[in-house]
Image (spheres, helix red, strand yellow):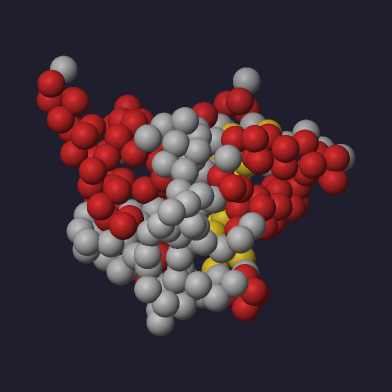
Amino acid sequence: MLRDEKAVVVFSGGQDSTTCLFWALETFKEVEVVTFNYNQRHKAEIQCAIDIAGELGVKHHLLDMELLNQLAPNALTRSDIEVKEGENGELPSTFVPGRNLVFLSFASILASQIGAKHIITGVCETDFSGYPDCRDSFVKSLNVTLNLAMDTSFVIHTPLMWLDKAETWKLADELGRLDYVREKTLTCYEGVIGDGCGQCPSCVLRKAGLDKYLQEKEAN
Ligand SMILES: [Zn+2]
């Protein structure tokens, strides 16, 4: 039934949202992607998203969200602020308050304009690093709110919500796209594509998940 419907993927060009894009392409008849340009730390992120969408022949919407940087200067948007993990329950320095609230709201407006019922986001509660708007309860709550706001029946899909990083690699593999995701996506805070710089928190998390998955695969 979903095969006949249209979907929008919130797409950054990273491992998670690219895996979600491949999932969506297997699930829906028609898929478009939306990327938010908020003056990311690395312009390479936007270019990576443009390149992947172009390569896969998917219609790409690039929305200007630079005002987010104006509201919340932090390590994701300002190269003079160091990327640090949160300590003692503090939020990491990559945190932009309410970012997913804003992104999903704008994605739903776009969805209503292009006649898409389904919205896909790669948010994940398992690798939860303190982002309250990545939680399942928040996404479900927002889904209800958006439907009330626009008198529609959007369905927000979160294929990665309960997966850890190793399981996200497994999903990419099941979709036949592990090598593509490994080589073409950008999650590194230093802006290095594929396996990345190997040092930043994002690279460390990504590699630990990949190693775990490849070991499990080999053992079976
Ligand atoms: Zn890195």
Of all residues, the one furthest to the front in this rendering is 88
Indicate whether 41 appears above or below 152. below
Residue 104 seen by the camera: yes
Percent x, y for residue 3?
A: 58, 26
Q: Which residue is drawn at 34% across and 39% down?
A: 165
- Quadrant where the N terminus sits is top right
The part of the image, by quadrant, that contains residue 213 is: top left
Residue sitting nearer the eye, 178 or 68: 68
Q: Residue at x 61, y 61 (%)?
A: 97
Q: Is 45 positioned to the left or the right of 152 in the image?
A: left
Percent x, y for residue 113?
A: 75, 52
Q: Which residue is drawn at 30% across and 48% down?
A: 205
Q: Which residue is drawn at 25% across and 52% down?
A: 204
Indicate whether 155 appears above or below 218. below
- Quadrant where the C terminus sits is top left
Of all residues, the one furthest to the left in this rendering is 218
- Report the number of discs: 0
Of all residues, the one furthest to the bottom in this rendering is 80
Q: Is 172 positioned to the left or the right of 132 in the image?
A: left
Residue sitting nearer the eye, 63 or 114: 63
Percent x, y for residue 147?
A: 80, 39
Of all residues, the one furthest to the top in this rendering is 220
Residue 52 seen by the camera: no
The part of the image, by quadrant, that contains residue 186 is: bottom left
Percent x, y for residue 34?
A: 57, 55
